Image (cartoon, grey):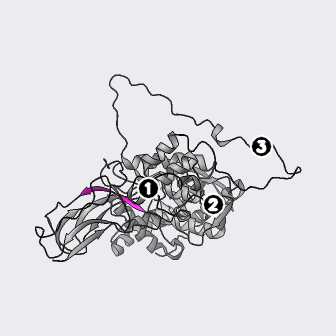
Amino acid sequence: MSEYKLIMPKMGESIAEATIISWLKNEGDAIDIDEAVLEIATDKVDSEVPSMEAGVLVKKLYNEGDVVAVGEAIAIISASGSAASAPKEESSAEVEKAPAASAPAVAAIENTVAQAQDTAAPALSNSDANRFYSPLVMNIARTEGISMQQLETIPGTGKDGRVTKRDILSFVKDGGASAPAATNTPEPSSRERVSPPKEENNKVTPSAPAVSLNPGDEIIEMDRMRKLIADHMVMSKHTSPHVTSFVEADVTNLVNWRNKIKGGFKAREGENFTFTPIFIEAIVKAIKDFPLINVSVNGDSIIKRKNINIGMAAALPSGNLIVPVIKNADFMNLTGLAKTVNDLANRARTNKLTPDEIQGGTYTVTNVGTFGNVLGTPIINQPQVAIMAMGAIVKKPAVIETEHGDLIGIRHKMYLSHSYDHRVVDGALGGMFVRRVADYLEQWDENREV
């Protein structure tokens, strides 16, 4: 009898572990090749783990709710098809527990809190330590101001001395994070000396106000995805000073052109042609004109991105939000953008996105006009530095300048809202960028073919 160990797969460059949501097979069940055995969740997306061999599930090595590192065996499958004769292997040592996912398996957000914090605080990373630390432990360490040197001194009670959530919280409770680690910062000269900075620990963290319940009120628990979105939005506002610039664009020529070609595109390609790929193309062109919009902040350094990867915010049936990413959007023509937009949007709604498809965005666009909103002030999707909201296209009376004089006519107009990180994007750059996007939309060629 041969045995096959089902391994926790690698699901993305920044993902080190996953939580088991549910087992789709029980011990003793027959499994076909490529048949899903269990569902897992990361801080980015939910997915199924298939078996690469046919056989019988002999042993589950972890339970639902357990956090398992990438590369660890999670189950044993008898490739011979015999479950009775397979030896019972002992389960792996107890690992850190994570809250069981209570929501349906839906994809989590394109840029999460952990990924953005990895960029914001590169000094605290697993690569600097002699043992593995889970993203949960690393996030707690960053929040509590625990240095890597302090983290390495914490006794771990998990597998192979691994530091668990309970270990690090006990360390914080006992006052282990009260003093910052000593550094070798040189003493400034008398000419350079300034007033000493206030200690980080003297900061007063505002707490959420107490909420009273009234008769008839209903308490709705946030699902896992909504909690991630909430954390990500709060983190973004704390990280970046947001500034928003607005431009109104006359897109009459663009609307007329789309109305002319959408029927033929539908007949030829078998799918709809929306405004989103047009908006993305205009943004890509503007990024080429202003490449310092396509950056990230890493401490005191600016990372200028080579690739132009456009994230597009998509609303899910659950009411949550996800941001699939169009990789290398500058290499696609309008037809390619339209097909990619439709594909990602459709698979986002049915929870079919892969982890890689919601990572690596360098700029994000959100179409608030889909919900009838004329404009919005979007929150930056960290670790990016800018995001644009496209408002609803509405008919308005407007002044039309002609060689024979000014006229009043009905025009299709829309607002573009550009939110940007004022640490690295000033008003001039942020304002010129959104104006350039509007110019590309206003100057649309009505004779263009697609």
> Position of 406 compared to 378: left or right?
right
Q: Is residue 21 magenta?
A: yes
Answer yes or no: is residue 411 visible.
no
Q: Is residue 91 magenta?
A: no
**Is 413 situated above or below 445?**
above
Quadrant that contains the N terminus: bottom left
State the residue in front, 148 or 314: 148
x and y percent of residue 322 in the render? 42, 56
Q: Residue at x 62, y 70 (%)?
A: 288
Q: The residue tagged with tag 2: helix, strand or loop?
A: strand
x and y percent of residue 217 in the render? 35, 28
**Residue found at the very far right of the displayed protein:** 191
> Position of 420 compared to 79: left or right?
right
What residue is disc 3 on? 196
Q: Amino acid at mark 1?
A: Ile
Circle 2 residues within 10 Å: few <14, some 14–19, many ≥20: some
Mark 2 and mark 1: span between their CA atoms?
A: 21 Å
Closer mark to the observer between disc 2 and disc 1? 2
Q: The residue tagged with tag 3: helix, strand or loop?
A: loop
What residue is disc 2 on? 298
> Looking at the image, is mark 2 or mark 1 earlier in the sequence?
1
The magenta span reads 9-30
> Looking at the image, is mark 3 or mark 1 earlier in the sequence?
1
> Looking at the image, is mark 3 or mark 2 earlier in the sequence?
3
**Is 207 situated above or below 95?**
above
Answer yes or no: is residue 29 visible.
yes
Q: Amino acid at mark 2?
A: Asn
